[in-house]
DNA sequence: TTGACTAGAACGAATGTTCGTTTTAATCTT
DNA sequence: AAGATTAAAACGAACATTCGTTCTAGTCAA
């Protein structure tokens, strides 16, 4: 594990655990066992650490979403796979999900766009748009439909991160998916 | 306007504008025109200001939600009114909505429960539960149903706070409501 | 020997808070 | 009514601490 990786992974841990501002550079050097000098050799400043972490995360999500698009034909299958992905990351790497959904980046990355206008979220909206064009999803404002389709999942994932769920997160997947899909799917018996 | 109120309202403004940690006590004294000494006379410390602000907000929401419960008969009407309330606060008092949904309280109010397990959110879940008992809402896990019913609205409100909407927020209400209600309502045609 | 990397002490700026004092307003005494 | 007394509220300079960052010195690999 390179020094850079050590820094990034402890930053992820500490930022989600205590928050960006409650984490000092001293905390990072202590936990990562990388000295101040080294950290400032690899990163411009504290913000640079956060920016690198954020970028890694967006890249990783973009890749996973593109995989999903290639591997599934219908919009329904794509969106279901996206929801499964979100649930599985939230369960196996809660820090990653917390940093993505929960941490308020704008407070310390003032130059970044808000998460929900980032590339991964745009990709999800593109899937929804495609579903409308194919007649799987009812025609309406894409942002409204996307919000309804994924809003429920995001809420329950947030609840999971807050530790207020009394069952494992995975147990909610089918319920949330069936609700959410019903919210936006075309009504066949119309 | 009392000194206390002046402090609370500028804290709301600055905390949502720049974030809690990017707001110094000096910023608050400057903007509120209340001296450092006075602030520490009314509040224990910086965290105390945030805690008071947060509590005011929860109280206000609890009152509004109880009004809604009294003024509407069916769960459907109640939930619709709640969604209207959320939209209207988000539009007329975006700071309030931002502080409620967007600000990461746990980073500076470590003793508070997360928002979504706070009293207002519990009241919303109680409405959903009631709707299930009355046969308006399909039987399933209450948390899952509540997340799906309000998750879409919360997402689009967040988008609105991020400034990425190209129409006024209110224009999304009917779309989001019909999606969201369809997600959880009982299907009449069995 | 040179250049990339590591180390951690030292620095200066900024922060949250304290504290001694002054001002204001209310209450009591005569 | 007028002065004396008290308590609450306001003030802001000063303080100790913490933070992000820089700097100098040293190590290692090629």
Image: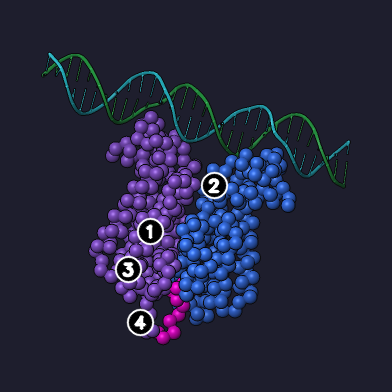
Chain colours: A blue, B purple, C cyan, D green
What range is drawn magenta here?
Answer: A179-190
Both labels 4 and 1 in a single chain: yes
Q: Are marks 1 and 3 in contact (CB under 8 Å)?
A: no
Q: Do the residues labelled 4 and 2 touch (CB within 8 Å)?
A: no
Closer to the chain start, of discs 1 and 3, is: 1
**Chain where mark 1 sits:** B
Percent coordinates x, y for residue D5 in the rendering: 23, 17
Relative horizontal placement of residue A11, taking residue B147 as reference (left or right): right
Tell me the distance, in whole angstroms, between the alpha carbons under discs 2 and 3.
37 Å
Q: Which of marks 3 and 4 is in front?
A: 3
Quadrant for residue A33, please give it.
top right
Which residue is denoted by mark 3 in the rendering?
Answer: B130
Q: Do the residues labelled 2 and 3 touch (CB within 8 Å)?
A: no
Q: Which mark is residue A18?
A: 2
Q: Residue A187 in magenta?
A: yes
Tell me the distance, in whole angstroms, between the alpha carbons under discs 3 and 4.
18 Å
At numbered mark 1, what does the secondary structure look like: helix, strand or loop?
helix
Which residue is denoted by mark 1 in the rendering?
Answer: B121
At numbered mark 3, what does the secondary structure look like: helix, strand or loop?
helix
Q: Which residue is drawn at 49% across and 47% down?
A: B107
Both labels 2 and 3 in a single chain: no
Both labels 1 and 2 in a single chain: no
Name the outermost residue toward the front: A166
Q: Are marks 3 and 4 in contact (CB under 8 Å)?
A: no
Relative horizontal placement of residue D11, taking residue A34 as reference (left or right): left
**Chain where mark 4 sits:** B
Tell me the distance, in whole angstroms, between the alpha carbons under discs 1 and 2.
24 Å
Q: Residue A107 in magenta?
A: no
Closer to the chain start, of discs 3 and 4, is: 3
Q: Which mark is residue B188?
A: 4
Tell me the distance, in whole angstroms, between the alpha carbons under discs 4 and 1.
28 Å
């Amino acid at each position: 594990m390179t020094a850079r990786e050590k820094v990034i992974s402890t930053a992820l841990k500490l930022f989600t655990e205590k928050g960006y501002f409650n984490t000092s550079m001293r905390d990072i050097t202590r936990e990562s066992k990388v000295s101040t000098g080294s950290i400032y050799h690899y990163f411009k400043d504290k913000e640079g650490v956060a920016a690198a972490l954020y970028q890694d995360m967006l890249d990783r999500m973009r890749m996973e979403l593109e995989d999903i698009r290639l591997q599934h034909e219908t919009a329904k299958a794509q969106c279901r796979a996206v929801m499964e992905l979100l649930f599985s990351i939230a369960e196996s790497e809660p820090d990653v999900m917390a940093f993505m959904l929960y941490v308020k980046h704008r407070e310390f990355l003032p130059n970044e766009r808000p998460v929900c206008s980032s590339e991964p979220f745009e990709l999800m909206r593109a899937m929804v748009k495609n579903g409308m064009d194919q007649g799987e999803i009812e025609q309406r404002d894409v942002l409204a439909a996307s919000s309804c389709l994924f809003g429920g999942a995001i809420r329950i994932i947030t609840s999971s991160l807050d530790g207020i769920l009394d069952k494992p997160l995975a147990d909610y997947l089918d319920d949330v998916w069936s609700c959410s899909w019903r919210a936006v799917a075309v009504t066949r018996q119309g």
